[in-house]
Amino acid sequence: MLAFLKKDNPLMLPLLFIATAAMWLGDIISPHFHSGVFEQMPMPLYQVVLMAFSQASWWATIIAAILLLFTGFVLNQLNARFRLIDEGTYLPGVLFVLIISSFHSIHQINPMLFAIFFLLIALHIVFPTYRIEKTIEPFFNSAFLISVGSLFYFPLIFFVLMLFYFMLNSRSFYWREWVVALLGIITPYLFAFSIYFIIDKPLELLNTLQYQLSVPATNDTIDVRYIVFFFFISIMMFSSIFYLRSNVIKKVVTRKYFGIITFIWILSLVLFILLDSVYIESIYLFAIPFSFILSNYLIKNRSKVGEDLIFIGLILLLLIVSFA
């Protein structure tokens, strides 16, 4: 099965569609809608989404599943375009979709479905700037997209640090790039505050931002299955990063790309620990670095027994989390 998943096989797409449909079928038949922090006082663009969708309906659940599959496609395009993994493979997108699909509590319209798309497009824009000095437009555009994504899911705004990390780690300092990046962050919020001012609700957006950063997501205890799952993927992340850093990734540019992907994982973990509002939906953020790094590890690892054990463990945990 792993050998099949590693290949750049067109059959993977319909099989992934069938697997996703199977994992989402129960929630399509009996749709639910859990109203959390980001629904109770939503960001402006997510508020528009909630007005457009019937929150607990089969068709809204189907649209959420389709958006997830589309995000997996964008993730694979990032891999194909920048050769993050030397061999052609659909494995990163497959792992991303399966990991998200295993969490039934987010089988609904949620802000991360939209915010994550803007984060991935920002990566598509900023990656080509490696070794292109004194270019400012990509940094404005990528910062602008992350800022727009935060108007769906406010904690995404912290991922502009990802952009600054890439600028520090892969480029010579050029002050205009930093200035336009800051302008890209500010511009969407200037528009948003202007609209709120026009409709005579100037403080409502500030109250929403404060609410989304400070209010606990839930008082429920995290299911032990999710704790085991997070523990497993954390061990896999550590071991995979150590393995890949040991001269397995030889191209300097690929090392830079994986540096920013690793930074996404670290930042996601920090936000999960420090912000009470960040909860189970953050699996969207964790799944990006996990999908790329584990895929690269499974393809480059020469120990067949080791990679089989890791893959079997991952599949078993996905089944337990999904269906137990």
Image (cartoon, rainbow, N blue to C red):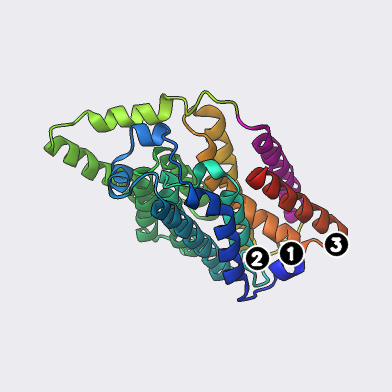
- Tell me whether the residue at label 3 lies in contact with that at label 1, contact meaning CB atoms closer than 8 angstroms: no
Residue under pointer 1: 299
Q: Position of residue 321 (x, y in %)?
A: 66, 43
Residue under pointer 2: 85
Look at the numbered disc 2 and give the secondary structure of its residue. Answer: loop
Does the image show residue 174? no
Look at the numbered disc 1 and give the secondary structure of its residue. Answer: helix
In the rendered image, the quadrant that contains the C terminus is: top right
Which contiguous range is marked in magenta? Answer: 222-245
Label whose residue precedes the other's in the sequence (2 or 3): 2
Cα–Cα span, label 2 and label 1:
8 Å
Indicate which disc residue 304 carries. Answer: 3
Under mark 1, the amino acid is Ile
Answer whether residue 91 is magenta in the image.
no
Q: Write the residue at 63% across / 55% down.
A: 291
Answer whether residue 233 is magenta in the image.
yes
**Figure check: 278 above or below 298:** above
Q: Write the residue at 70% across / 45% down.
A: 320
